Amino acid sequence: MTSSANCDRVRHRRPLIIGVSGASGLIYAVRTVKYLLQADYAVELVASQSAYQVWQEEYDTQMPGDSHRQTQFWRQACGESERGKLVCHRWQDVGANIASGSFRTLGMAIVPCSMSTVAKISAGLSSDLLLRAADVQLKEGRPLVVVPRETPFNLIHLRNLTQLAEAGVRVVPAIPAWYHHPQTIEDLVDFVVMRMLDQLDIDCTPVARWKESEP
């Protein structure tokens, strides 16, 4: 095996952190985790405190607080019971592995990302595990992607997003395209998921790309 291929295998084994904040649009997180697990990625997931309430509002079910039960809960929501590796963390567990820079990862995506989360990251606040994990990616120079799901943006939102972009964060608003001829809500969601994962050099969604004959 070549050294390049070996490096690719080592990189693939490193987990990707998925942060789920309290913004509306948790389907973006569900579809992201689904495709990562189907592609046999390792995922470390942390949902913020407010994400529990949003899940209740959008799905009329309660997300478990226990880490093990939450892992099974997310696998069921994604329809992927076996492939990949999924570890869920409690939002208040600031002693988790993803809170340390010595725990190597592929980076982090916060999907969806609330404006409150954007503001706290831009201010350097680390009051829960999601925020701490995001801060770690920045200090370690690893990829951090946020998927803001808000409209319209006010001036404070835009300034906070600009500050994140200046710090190297990739900002991927939840804005779908139509050139791939979407037929369902999931088609629209998957386009955003594809573009978000592109920022992390991960290609595992079935969305047709512009001028490409096959996804």
Image (cartoon, rainbow, N blue to C red):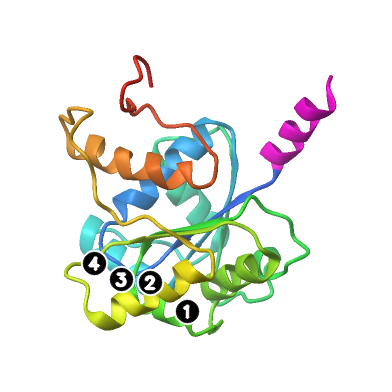
* First-in-chain label (4 vs 1): 1
What residue would you read off at disc 4?
Answer: 150
Please state if 73 lies on the left or on the right of 210 as rendered. right
Q: Which residues are magenta?
A: 1-13
**Residue behind mark 3:** 53
In the image, which is nearer the foreground, mark 1 or mark 3? 1
Q: Which residue is mark 1?
A: 122
Residue mark closest to the camera, 4 vs 2: 2
What distance separates the C-alpha of mark 1 from that of mark 3?
24 Å
Type of the residue with mark 4: Glu
Q: Which residue is mark 2?
A: 161
The residue depicted at 62 percent of the width and 65 percent of the height is 137
Amino acid type, label 3: Gln
> Regarding mark 2 in the picture, which secondary structure is present there?
helix
Front tag of 4 and 3: 4
Mark 1 or mark 3: whose residue is earlier in sequence: 3
Q: Residue furthest front?
A: 166
Where 127 falls versus 43 (above or below)? Answer: below
Q: Is residue 138 magenta?
A: no
Predominant secondary structure in magenta?
helix
Tag 2 or tag 4, which sits nearer the N-term?
4
Q: Nearer the viewer, residue 20 or 194?
A: 194
Amino acid type, callout 2: Leu
Separation of marks 2 and 1 at Cα, in angstroms: 8 Å
Q: Residue 27 in the image: state x and y as whole percent.
A: 30, 50
Instruction: Judge from the rendering whether residue 174 lies leftward or rightward of residue 203; answer left or right.
Output: left
**Secondary element type, mark 3:** helix
Three-letter amino acid code at the position of disc 1: Ser
Locate residue 101: give its quadrant.
Answer: bottom right
Q: Crowding at label 2, few (<14), some or many (≥20) Cα neighbours within 10 Å?
A: many
